[in-house]
Amino acid sequence: MSHEGIRFSSKEEQARENQQNRPLPRVAVTPEKVRVLLTEGKGMEIDWADGHKSAWSFAWLRDACPCATCIEERAQEGRKPGQPKPKPAALLPMYAPPPKPRSVHPVGRYAIQFNWLDGHAGGIYSWEYLRRVCQCQECTFAAAEPAGTPNY
Ligand SMILES: [Zn+2]
Ligand SMILES: [Zn+2]
């Protein structure tokens, strides 16, 4: 394997650090429009006051649940927010319906809460959290792992 393909400079690492640690300006965590595509079962889209746009699938959001139980579970399994659990080594493939909320509720002016069909409802997704886990190309590139670890 040639090293020419590795393009992570220290500058990009710096950007990644900044991405994770810097406080976000208010316009970056203020949603201008929130679209929850419940009927389509697709996911959620947010247009932010600073012009940035984010979108997540419901499956991703379910696996990024910010409740204490899910955070601990992810930490134990070494999963990042939105990263699915490893598939159980079942002999028979079991059909699992894709995660979808039964209902969605605003929490004050700072967050949104999903009541998932699987009965889970503890996660409060703050705007700031959602902005920090934006999955757009720009943000995922800035947050990418250093060369040598797989990207998801
Ligand atoms: Zn949870
Ligand atoms: Zn983004």
Image (cartoon, helix red, strand yellow):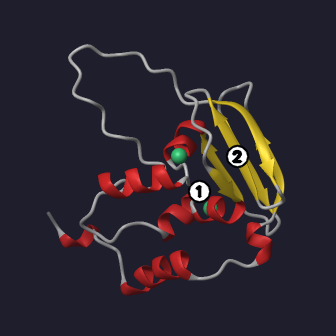
Mark 2, Cα crowd under 10 Å, few <14 / some 14-19 / many 20+, is some
Residue identified by numbered label 1: 136
Count of numbered labels shown in the rendering = 2
Residue 127 pos. (x, y %):
71, 61
Asked whether disc 1 touches disc 2, contact meaning CB atoms under 8 Å apart, the reply is no
Q: Is mark 1 within 8 Å of ligand 2?
A: yes
Label 2 SS: strand
Horizontal relation, residue 75 to residue 3: left or right? right
| Camera sees residue 81 | no
Label 1 SS: loop
Residue 119 in which image quadrant? top right
Residue identified by numbered label 2: 113
Kind of residue at disc 2 = Gln
Residue 104 pos. (x, y %):
75, 38
| Camera sees residue 33 | yes
Which residue shows up at 84% across the image and 60% down it? 109
Residue 50 pos. (x, y %):
79, 69
Q: Distance between the residues labelled 1 and 2?
A: 21 Å
